[in-house]
Amino acid sequence: MSDNHADIRASVRALCEKFPPEYWRKLDRERAYPTEFVKALTEAGFLAALIPESYGGSGLTMGAAAAIMEEIHASGSNGAACHAQMYTMGTILRHGNDAQKKKYLPKIAAGELRLQAFGVTEPTSGTDTLSLRTTAKREGNDGYVINGQKIWTSRAEHSDLMLLLARTTPKEQARKRTEGLSVFIVDMKEQAKAIAIKPIRTMMNHATTEVFFENLRVPVENLIGEEGQGFRYILGGMNAERILIASECIGDAKWFIEKATDYAKSRAVFGKPIGQNQGIQFPIARAYAQMRAAELMVHEAAYKYDAGGDIGPEANMAKLLAADASWAAADMCVQTHGGFGFAEEFDIERKFRETRLYQVAPISTNLILSYLAEHVLGLPRSY
Ligand SMILES: Cc1cc2nc3c(=O)[nH]c(=O)nc-3n(C[C@H](O)[C@H](O)[C@H](O)COP(=O)(O)OP(=O)(O)OC[C@H]3O[C@@H](n4cnc5c(N)ncnc54)[C@H](O)[C@@H]3O)c2cc1C
């Protein structure tokens, strides 16, 4: 790829330098939200990268957006607190009507409205999205009444809006298996009384929650696109999410590889640098090769995304390979550091916990393999 977005990368690096490891360590200890970091990224316009200029965004390519997320992670920061602001709006952009785009996109671009919450996963259905149980019942001409529960709704406490997937037609009455679900824009502040948010403490600092809806009223103008077609809209948006999270994994892998290389050069045991031993060199070199290969697939996916067309296979493979590369690099980095890999002040154990998530979310490794087996290789559906 010719354009590696050097200027954007340098600006992101410069911004991240203002948020040193101590900042992230303290937040991690307190499980606190990086408000100042998210504010700085928003003010610099990075989170509006994918919003067209006509709606107040920067109108950048997916390649540029991916470079932003990668650089955040390669600097030792964590984009998980705000990455959804970059891609969740894509559902409004692609499937919303003119009035919705004009109402929401400029404010999201300016950071006046945070669209950070994405309510898809439920406790009973898990990966089987079509079995979700949250219902949206049409009530007269005014709108819908929503009841149900979501789980793992990240950043719900730090968002003004939520993109919510709910069932509008009972599963057995839907014309097709993939129909009967609809997407809504929920104004969480306006509807606060009908929404209960319960934080879930996790092994890393991720601001994730359970969300309960009791008679949540959503006006009809907040339905995105056609009723019953929501699953298709959400799936389309997931490709962007996968590419951007894959970029974060590439950034993490680069961070682990740099840390390990520096340490292997400076740490002397038995009178020589540990990095002189092939037992230390080879895992670092292997992690580097694995990261570079995954990086190529991320570039390919971003390039195809910008060119248009079906990028399901590339987006999924980018996510799979990048998550594997960051996890392999994380494990190698701990091993290279010996005991210090476990010490909080080296930041490795924190990044190790953070990058582990991407084997499971936003889609687990097994489900990507099933997708490739069925949709690319034509093998029988396994579930
Ligand atoms: C920290 C965190 C943040 C998240 N943020 C969000 C969010 O903001 N919004 C949101 O909607 N969701 C979010 N998620 C949910 C995430 O997308 C799911 O956890 C993920 O898709 C896996 O679903 P599950 O946890 O229900 O696992 P399950 O579906 O219960 O699966 C459990 C395990 O079984 C495997 N498995 C299941 N079915 C099959 C099969 N047919 N073949 C082979 N293996 C199978 C899976 O791969 C997985 O390893 C988040 C999750 C976490 C942990």
Image (spheres, grey):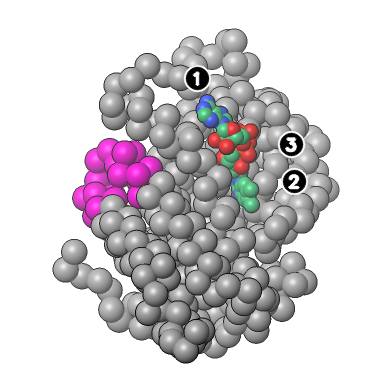
The answer to which quarter of the image holds residue 284 is bottom left
Q: CA distance from mark 2 to mark 1?
A: 27 Å
Establish if 29 lies above or below 296: below
* Viewer-side residue, 294 vs 343: 343
- Which residue is tagged 3? 149
Query: Residue at the spot x=35%, y=28% of the render?
Result: 373
Residue 331 in the image: x percent, y percent? Answer: 52, 61
Discs 3, 2 touching: Cβ within 8 Å: yes
Look at label 3 and name its amino acid.
Gln
The quarter of the rendering in which ligand 1 is drawn is top right
Q: Nearer the viewer, mark 3 or mark 1?
A: 1
Discs 2, 1 touching: Cβ within 8 Å: no
Any magenta on residue 314?
Answer: yes
State the SS at label 1. loop
Identify the residue at the far front of this view: 270
Magenta stretch, residue numbers: 298-318
Residue 372 in the image: x percent, y percent? Answer: 35, 32
Establish if 285 lies above or below 169: below
Q: Which of the numbered marks, if any, corresponds to residue 210? A: 2
Q: CA distance from mark 3 to mark 1?
A: 24 Å
Q: Which of the numbered marks, if any, corresponds to residue 383? A: 1
Residue 246 in the image: x percent, y percent? Answer: 41, 55
Query: Residue at the spot x=46%, y=57% of the render?
Result: 328
Ligand 1 within 8 Å of disc 1? The answer is yes
